[in-house]
Image (tube, helix red, strand yellow):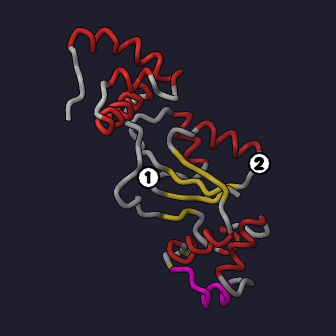
Amino acid sequence: MFFVIRVRGTTGVKRDIADTLKMLRLNRLNHGVLIEENPSSEGMLQKSKDYITWGEITPETLSEIIYKRGEFVGGIRVTDELLAEKTDYSSIDDLSTALINGDVKATDIEMKPVFRLHPPRKGYEGIRRSIGERTITQAAEIAIETKTNLLDVIRNSDNHDSLQRVNVKLKAFFQVQHVYVAV
């Protein structure tokens, strides 16, 4: 069983990907759903991979999500008492195990299938720079720490393959500018 969360908004989404997200019931940012593991759903996840994140969920994590964010139809919070009253399950832990095993679906017990989550504190970690830029930044940090020339750090790096391209592009720039890292 996968837990899928939408991490990007609706702006600029192609129609077929938007339809896939709608079929997954991921209509809004930070909504999460449980998806069964089968070839059809895995294809849908791959198609919309740029807008979602997913992974296998454990019963403990699912029970915590149900406890904090689970709702019955009508906006009523899921509690152990209500769960025992409305269903055959005595606790949220039993329900989460049954959901992961595929014994029951959330809609069968009149629970909303979508979990409305809060965004992460301090935002999402994003890659805002290309591989080459990150490599240059890492090399610059090493150069500052060791008080050496940036080109020497790039040449002597263990990650020689990825830095080789950076070295070729930057060699002319650094020779013309005579840029050295001085601390």
Quadrant of the image for the N terminus? bottom right
Decide: is 171 above or below 108. Answer: above
Position of 24 compared to 180: left or right? right
Q: Farthest residue to the front: give it.
A: 147
Residue carrying label 1:
29
Q: Residue at x 31, y 29 (%)?
A: 148
SS for tag 1?
loop
Where in the figure is residue 183, as x and y percent of width and height? 20, 36
Look at the image and give the residue range highlighted in magenta: 77-86
Query: Type of residue at label 1?
Result: Leu
Residue closest to the eye, 6 or 127: 127
Q: Where, by quadrant of the figure, is residue 126 drawn?
A: top left
Residue closest to the eye, 101 or 173: 173
**Marking on residue 38:** 2
Queried whether the magenta region covers residue 171, the answer comes back as no
Q: Residue at x 50, y 42 (%)?
A: 51
Residue closest to the eye, 16 or 100: 100
Where in the figure is residue 59, as x and y percent of width and height? 68, 70
Where in the figure is residue 82, as x and y percent of width and height? 60, 87
Q: Mark 2 Cα within 10 Å, few/some/many (few <14, many 20+)?
A: few
Question: Pointers 1 and 2 in contact (CB under 8 A)?
Answer: no
Where in the figure is residue 40, as x and y percent of width and height? 73, 43
Distance from the alpha carbon under mark 1 to that under mark 2: 24 Å
Q: Residue at x 40, y 59 (%)?
A: 119
